[in-house]
Image (tube, helix red, strand yellow):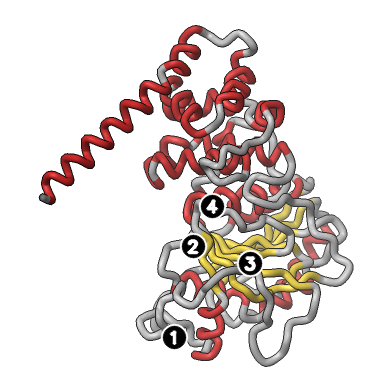
Amino acid sequence: MADPGAIRLPLVSFVLTRQPGDDFARVIEAMRMQTYPRFEAILVDAGATASSRTTLEHLIDGDPRFKTVSVDTDPGPFGRASLGLAAAEGEFVTFLDATELPVPSFTAVHIQAHLASRHNIAFTASSISMDEPARGGLPHASLASGSAAAWLQPATPVLRLSCLDDDVFADLASRTTLLEPARLGWSASPDAAQMYRRFIIDLLDPGAGASTEQPSSPTALYAPLCQLLGGSAGIGMPLSRRLPGAVPEPTDEGVAGGTVADDRLRLRVWAANGSDFARRIGAQRYWDGLTLLLGGLPPGSGEVPSPSQIAERTDGLLPLLVRAFGERRAIHRLDSQLPRPAVLAILRKHHGAGLPLRVHFALHTTVLRQMNERLRQHLRARKAKRRQS
C-alpha cells in the first residue's frame, strides 16, 4: 500500500475555471475533501475585479494547495484553461469548470487507474452526473463499454493508494475499459471529466498550427488528439457532478465531430507536429489518425465526408504536411489513405483548380509506389520463409 509519507506520489494539477457569474466556493470545498494527498488547484479568475480577487483570497484562506491566476479580460473557455495550465506543475492535469464538483475519491480513483494500467495511456475519463453521489462507496454508472476484467494489472504487484481499499480496487478494475488509440467510441462531451498526462498535453500546442483560431474548449482539442497519441481508459462510474441549473460550456462530440473550426484546428495541430508524432507512434498509425480526424471513420472504410466538407476542414492543412514530410511524400500518403476525390479536394483548396505539373506527377506515381511496396513486402516474406525452412 502506498503511504503518502513513504513514497512521492504524482502531483495532480486541477485547472479550475468559471464562466462569468459562477462562484468558486463549492468547487473549492469539493477539492478540500479529496482523499488523494498530493494535488494543487489553479483558480483562473477571468474578468477579475478587485472584489473577485479579495473573495478568492478569502475562500482560499492561506491553503498552499490553491493558486490564483487573475486577468482583467475573459479569453474564453480555452484561453482560461491555457492560463491555468501555464501555472500548473503537476504530472497529471484535470480541467474542471466551477460548476463541476469532484467526489472525494475523484483524484485517487483516476490516479489509481493510471498506476494500475497495463499501458501508459494518455488520459482517463469518468462521467459527470447531475445527481448527488451515493454515500458509502463509489457511485455507479457506465462511461466505459466492453470487457474490462483483464485490463488493470492484478492488485498484488501494483502500486496501491492507501485511501482505496481492496474492495474499491476490485470495483475499479471491473469497471475500467481501455480505448485503444485507433478505436472510435470515446466522446469529447460535456458529460465526461478527464485526467491527462501532462507531457502529452505539452506536445499539442495549438500555436503549432500557425492559426489564430482557438478550440471551443480544452476537451475539444486535447481529448481527441491525446486519444490518437496514447489511447485512454473509461472509468465506468460518475466521479463528479454538475450543480443543478448549470449549463456546460459548448464542446463537440466524437473524434472528428463538432464545429468545423475545431475539426480544422485539430487537423492543423496534428499536421504541424507530423514528423514528431510519426516518429513517436509510427508512420502508419499517424496517417490512420489523420484519416480519423478528417472523417471520423475507421481507416480503409472508404467513407469520408464530401469534397466540399473536406475542403472546408482542411484549409491550411497541406502546407503543414508538406513542411513535415515533403510535398511528394505527403501527396503519396494522402492518396494511399483517402479516395481520390478527397485528395483532389485537399490539393485544390491550396493550389486552386489548376494543379501544378509536379502535383499531377506525384498523383500518377502513387500507384507505382504502392505496387513497389507490395512487391518489397512479398520478397521480404519469401526471404523470411526461406530462413525458417
Gap in angstroms between the C-alphas marked 4 and 3:
22 Å
Residue at (66% x, 65% y) in the render: 193
Q: Which residue is mark 1?
A: 3
Amino acid at dot 2: Glu
Q: Is residue 308 left or right of residue 229?
A: right
Can I make out residue 50 in this image?
yes
Indicate which disc, 3 or 1, sits on the residue closer to the N terminus: 1
Of the two numbered discs 3 and 2 on the same chain, state the one appearing first in sequence: 3
- Marks 4 and 1 sit apart, C-alpha to C-alpha, by 31 Å
Q: Is residue 368 left or right of residue 67?
A: left
Which label sits in the foreground, 4 or 2?
A: 4
For the residues marked 1 and 2, what is the alpha-carbon distance in whole angstroms? Answer: 19 Å
Task: Give x and y (percent) for residue 288.
Answer: 49, 42
Element type where label 1 sits in the image: loop
Number of numbered discs present? 4
Question: What residue is disc 3 on?
Answer: 41
Task: Give the percent coordinates (x, y) of residue 353.
Answer: 64, 11
Residue type marked 4: Cys
Residue under label 4, please give it: 226
Q: What secondary structure is found at the residue carrying circle 3?
A: strand
Considering only order in the chain, which callout, 2 or 4, is on the residue closer to the N terminus? 2
